[in-house]
Image (cartoon, rainbow, N blue to C red):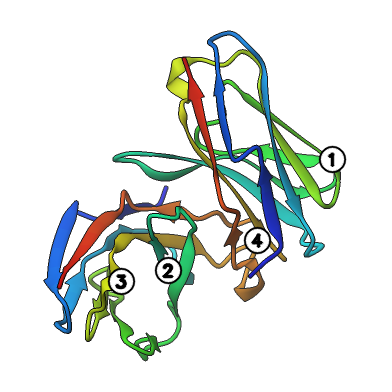
Protein backbone atom coordinates (compact mmCIF):
# COMPACT_ATOMS: atom_id res chain seq x y z
CA UNK A 1 0.00 0.00 0.00
CA UNK A 2 1.14 3.55 -0.80
CA UNK A 3 2.33 5.40 2.31
CA UNK A 4 -0.42 7.97 2.69
CA UNK A 5 -1.87 9.09 5.98
CA UNK A 6 -4.55 11.64 6.72
CA UNK A 7 -5.16 13.45 9.96
CA UNK A 8 -7.46 13.72 11.69
CA UNK A 9 -9.52 10.74 10.59
CA UNK A 10 -12.68 12.15 12.11
CA UNK A 11 -13.56 15.68 13.12
CA UNK A 12 -16.67 17.48 14.31
CA UNK A 13 -16.56 21.24 14.24
CA UNK A 14 -18.91 24.18 14.45
CA UNK A 15 -19.99 26.46 11.66
CA UNK A 16 -17.63 29.40 11.24
CA UNK A 17 -14.55 27.76 12.72
CA UNK A 18 -11.36 27.18 10.72
CA UNK A 19 -10.35 23.60 10.00
CA UNK A 20 -7.15 22.17 8.57
CA UNK A 21 -6.80 18.65 7.26
CA UNK A 22 -3.40 17.15 6.69
CA UNK A 23 -2.21 14.66 4.12
CA UNK A 24 1.21 13.11 4.59
CA UNK A 25 3.01 10.82 2.13
CA UNK A 26 6.22 8.83 2.34
CA UNK A 27 6.45 8.02 -1.39
CA UNK A 28 8.15 11.25 -2.48
CA UNK A 29 5.47 11.64 -5.19
CA UNK A 30 5.27 14.97 -6.94
CA UNK A 31 1.49 15.26 -7.30
CA UNK A 32 -1.01 15.45 -4.48
CA UNK A 33 -4.78 15.91 -4.61
CA UNK A 34 -7.68 16.68 -2.33
CA UNK A 35 -11.14 15.28 -3.11
CA UNK A 36 -14.45 15.37 -1.36
CA UNK A 37 -16.98 12.54 -1.49
CA UNK A 38 -20.68 13.15 -1.12
CA UNK A 39 -23.63 10.83 -1.74
CA UNK A 40 -24.78 11.04 -5.34
CA UNK A 41 -21.66 12.87 -6.49
CA UNK A 42 -18.80 10.42 -6.42
CA UNK A 43 -15.44 12.04 -5.73
CA UNK A 44 -14.86 15.63 -6.81
CA UNK A 45 -11.50 17.36 -7.01
CA UNK A 46 -11.03 20.35 -4.69
CA UNK A 47 -7.40 21.32 -5.26
CA UNK A 48 -4.23 19.66 -6.39
CA UNK A 49 -0.51 20.28 -6.21
CA UNK A 50 2.13 19.53 -8.83
CA UNK A 51 5.10 20.42 -6.64
CA UNK A 52 6.18 22.31 -3.57
CA UNK A 53 4.36 25.64 -3.50
CA UNK A 54 2.66 24.80 -6.85
CA UNK A 55 -1.10 24.34 -6.52
CA UNK A 56 -4.18 24.72 -8.67
CA UNK A 57 -7.94 24.62 -8.30
CA UNK A 58 -10.23 21.72 -9.02
CA UNK A 59 -13.93 21.74 -9.79
CA UNK A 60 -15.18 22.49 -6.24
CA UNK A 61 -12.53 24.82 -4.80
CA UNK A 62 -14.76 27.57 -3.38
CA UNK A 63 -14.35 27.84 0.40
CA UNK A 64 -11.11 25.86 0.44
CA UNK A 65 -7.44 26.73 0.34
CA UNK A 66 -4.36 24.54 0.23
CA UNK A 67 -0.69 24.76 0.97
CA UNK A 68 2.31 22.61 0.25
CA UNK A 69 5.56 23.71 1.83
CA UNK A 70 7.16 20.25 1.74
CA UNK A 71 6.95 17.41 -0.73
CA UNK A 72 5.42 15.09 1.84
CA UNK A 73 2.66 17.32 3.22
CA UNK A 74 -0.43 18.79 1.59
CA UNK A 75 -2.78 20.79 3.79
CA UNK A 76 -6.42 21.57 3.09
CA UNK A 77 -7.93 24.49 5.00
CA UNK A 78 -11.53 25.49 5.43
CA UNK A 79 -11.20 29.11 6.52
CA UNK A 80 -14.73 29.27 7.93
CA UNK A 81 -16.46 25.91 7.88
CA UNK A 82 -20.06 25.66 6.67
CA UNK A 83 -22.56 22.80 6.91
CA UNK A 84 -22.25 22.26 3.15
CA UNK A 85 -18.64 21.23 3.75
CA UNK A 86 -19.71 18.22 5.79
CA UNK A 87 -18.19 15.43 3.75
CA UNK A 88 -15.56 12.74 3.53
CA UNK A 89 -12.26 14.12 2.32
CA UNK A 90 -9.69 12.04 0.48
CA UNK A 91 -6.11 12.78 -0.31
CA UNK A 92 -4.42 11.12 -3.26
CA UNK A 93 -0.91 11.06 -4.66
CA UNK A 94 0.69 10.26 -7.98
CA UNK A 95 4.24 10.16 -9.23
CA UNK A 96 3.46 12.20 -12.31
CA UNK A 97 0.67 14.18 -13.89
CA UNK A 98 0.27 12.29 -17.13
CA UNK A 99 0.68 8.87 -18.61
CA UNK A 100 0.83 5.65 -16.65
CA UNK A 101 2.89 7.27 -13.90
CA UNK A 102 -0.13 9.42 -13.07
CA UNK A 103 -1.78 6.50 -11.31
CA UNK A 104 -3.43 7.88 -8.19
CA UNK A 105 -3.28 6.24 -4.79
CA UNK A 106 -5.70 7.26 -2.10
CA UNK A 107 -5.42 7.88 1.60
CA UNK A 108 -7.90 6.45 4.13
CA UNK A 109 -10.16 9.53 4.19
CA UNK A 110 -11.25 12.05 6.81
CA UNK A 111 -14.87 12.35 7.86
CA UNK A 112 -15.66 15.98 8.65
CA UNK A 113 -18.93 17.04 10.22
CA UNK A 114 -19.81 20.73 10.50
CA UNK A 115 -22.62 21.41 12.95
CA UNK B 1 -15.23 18.67 -20.16
CA UNK B 2 -15.29 14.95 -19.67
CA UNK B 3 -18.21 13.31 -17.92
CA UNK B 4 -18.63 9.83 -16.52
CA UNK B 5 -22.08 8.33 -16.07
CA UNK B 6 -23.05 5.39 -13.93
CA UNK B 7 -26.79 5.15 -14.36
CA UNK B 8 -27.47 2.27 -11.96
CA UNK B 9 -27.26 3.38 -8.32
CA UNK B 10 -27.56 -0.14 -6.93
CA UNK B 11 -27.16 -3.72 -8.02
CA UNK B 12 -27.38 -7.09 -6.35
CA UNK B 13 -25.82 -10.42 -7.24
CA UNK B 14 -25.99 -13.94 -5.85
CA UNK B 15 -22.74 -15.30 -4.47
CA UNK B 16 -20.78 -17.25 -7.15
CA UNK B 17 -22.74 -15.60 -9.97
CA UNK B 18 -21.57 -13.01 -12.47
CA UNK B 19 -22.53 -9.36 -12.46
CA UNK B 20 -21.82 -6.50 -14.87
CA UNK B 21 -21.60 -2.87 -13.80
CA UNK B 22 -22.16 -0.26 -16.49
CA UNK B 23 -20.32 2.96 -17.19
CA UNK B 24 -20.40 5.41 -20.07
CA UNK B 25 -18.25 8.47 -20.60
CA UNK B 26 -18.09 11.44 -22.85
CA UNK B 27 -14.85 12.84 -24.25
CA UNK B 28 -13.45 14.37 -27.40
CA UNK B 29 -9.99 12.98 -26.72
CA UNK B 30 -8.53 9.90 -28.36
CA UNK B 31 -5.96 8.96 -25.75
CA UNK B 32 -7.05 8.39 -22.17
CA UNK B 33 -7.34 5.91 -19.33
CA UNK B 34 -10.37 4.37 -17.68
CA UNK B 35 -10.53 2.88 -14.20
CA UNK B 36 -12.77 1.01 -11.86
CA UNK B 37 -12.27 1.71 -8.16
CA UNK B 38 -13.77 -0.29 -5.31
CA UNK B 39 -14.74 1.33 -2.03
CA UNK B 40 -15.65 -1.18 0.70
CA UNK B 41 -17.23 -0.11 3.99
CA UNK B 42 -13.75 0.74 5.28
CA UNK B 43 -13.87 3.72 2.84
CA UNK B 44 -10.49 2.87 1.34
CA UNK B 45 -10.40 3.52 -2.40
CA UNK B 46 -8.92 0.47 -4.13
CA UNK B 47 -7.97 0.38 -7.79
CA UNK B 48 -9.59 -2.70 -9.33
CA UNK B 49 -8.66 -2.45 -12.98
CA UNK B 50 -7.31 -0.02 -15.58
CA UNK B 51 -7.82 0.21 -19.32
CA UNK B 52 -5.68 2.23 -21.69
CA UNK B 53 -7.73 3.59 -24.59
CA UNK B 54 -5.09 2.81 -27.18
CA UNK B 55 -5.23 -0.89 -26.30
CA UNK B 56 -7.93 -2.87 -28.07
CA UNK B 57 -7.63 -5.83 -25.73
CA UNK B 58 -9.92 -5.73 -22.73
CA UNK B 59 -8.12 -5.63 -19.39
CA UNK B 60 -8.52 -8.49 -16.93
CA UNK B 61 -7.47 -8.92 -13.32
CA UNK B 62 -8.34 -12.33 -11.95
CA UNK B 63 -12.15 -12.38 -11.54
CA UNK B 64 -12.51 -8.83 -12.82
CA UNK B 65 -12.66 -7.96 -16.50
CA UNK B 66 -13.86 -5.05 -18.56
CA UNK B 67 -15.76 -4.67 -21.79
CA UNK B 68 -14.27 -1.57 -23.39
CA UNK B 69 -16.19 -0.24 -26.39
CA UNK B 70 -14.31 2.87 -27.50
CA UNK B 71 -16.67 3.91 -30.27
CA UNK B 72 -19.67 3.59 -27.98
CA UNK B 73 -17.74 5.21 -25.08
CA UNK B 74 -18.74 2.36 -22.84
CA UNK B 75 -16.65 0.73 -20.11
CA UNK B 76 -18.39 -1.99 -18.12
CA UNK B 77 -16.94 -4.11 -15.32
CA UNK B 78 -17.69 -7.80 -15.09
CA UNK B 79 -17.20 -9.59 -11.81
CA UNK B 80 -17.17 -13.37 -12.12
CA UNK B 81 -17.73 -15.85 -9.30
CA UNK B 82 -18.92 -13.06 -7.02
CA UNK B 83 -17.79 -13.24 -3.41
CA UNK B 84 -19.16 -11.66 -0.26
CA UNK B 85 -16.05 -9.48 -0.12
CA UNK B 86 -17.00 -7.93 -3.44
CA UNK B 87 -19.82 -6.04 -1.75
CA UNK B 88 -18.83 -2.39 -2.01
CA UNK B 89 -19.37 0.81 -3.88
CA UNK B 90 -17.75 0.82 -7.31
CA UNK B 91 -16.67 3.95 -9.12
CA UNK B 92 -15.86 4.34 -12.77
CA UNK B 93 -13.28 7.03 -13.52
CA UNK B 94 -11.68 8.72 -16.52
CA UNK B 95 -8.35 10.42 -16.97
CA UNK B 96 -6.90 11.94 -20.09
CA UNK B 97 -3.41 10.94 -21.11
CA UNK B 98 -2.06 14.47 -21.21
CA UNK B 99 0.03 16.30 -18.63
CA UNK B 100 -1.59 17.43 -15.36
CA UNK B 101 -4.54 15.21 -16.16
CA UNK B 102 -7.21 14.80 -13.51
CA UNK B 103 -9.52 11.97 -12.55
CA UNK B 104 -13.21 12.41 -13.25
CA UNK B 105 -15.43 10.04 -11.32
CA UNK B 106 -18.90 8.70 -11.87
CA UNK B 107 -21.39 8.80 -9.02
CA UNK B 108 -20.80 5.19 -8.09
CA UNK B 109 -22.86 2.05 -7.81
CA UNK B 110 -23.52 0.07 -4.65
CA UNK B 111 -23.10 -3.65 -5.17
CA UNK B 112 -24.55 -6.08 -2.69
CA UNK B 113 -23.78 -9.81 -2.71
CA UNK B 114 -26.44 -12.26 -1.49
CA UNK B 115 -25.14 -15.39 0.27
Q: In which quarter of the image is residue B34?
A: bottom left
Check whether the beta carbons of the residues at disc 2 and disc 1 lie within 8 A of each other.
no
**Alpha-carbon span between mark 4 and mark 1:** 18 Å
Read off the residue under disc 3.
B86
Q: Residue at x 17, y 55 (%)?
A: B10
**Alpha-carbon span between mark 4 and mark 2:** 18 Å
Read off the residue under disc 2.
B35
**Alpha-carbon span between mark 2 and mark 1:** 29 Å
Whether discs 2 and 1 lie on one chain: the answer is: no
Q: Which of marks 2 and 3 is nearer the N terminus?
A: 2
Q: Which residue is drawn at 26% across and 72% down?
A: B84
Residue B8 seen by the camera: no
Give residue B111's position: percent from left, percent from top. Answer: 23, 62
Chain under label 2?
B
Chain under label 4?
B
Read off the residue under disc 1.
A53
**Relative side of A22 to B78, left or right:** right
Whether discs 4 and 3 lie on one chain: the answer is: yes
Residue B47 seen by the camera: yes
Chain under label 1?
A
Quadrant including the N terminus of chain A: bottom right
Read off the residue under disc 4.
B99
Q: Which residue is drawn at 28% across and 65% down?
A: B87
Give residue A49's position: percent from left, percent from top. Answer: 72, 46
* Of labels 4 and 2, the one closer to you: 2
Q: What element carries label 3?
A: helix
Q: What element carries label 1?
A: loop
Q: Which residue is drawn at 45% across and 17% down?
A: A83
**Alpha-carbon span between mark 4 and mark 3:** 33 Å
* Of labels 3 and 1, the one closer to you: 3
Q: Earlier in the sequence, mark 4 or mark 3?
A: 3
Label 3 crowd bin: few (<14), some (14–19), many (20+), radius 10 Å: some
Amino acid sequence: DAGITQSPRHKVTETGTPVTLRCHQTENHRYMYWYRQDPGHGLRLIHYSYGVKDTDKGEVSDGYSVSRSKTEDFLLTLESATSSQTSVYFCAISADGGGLAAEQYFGPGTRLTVT
Amino acid sequence: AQTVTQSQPEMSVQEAETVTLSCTYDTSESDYYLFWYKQPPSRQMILVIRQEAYKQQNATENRFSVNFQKAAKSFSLKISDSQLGDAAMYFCAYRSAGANSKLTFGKGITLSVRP
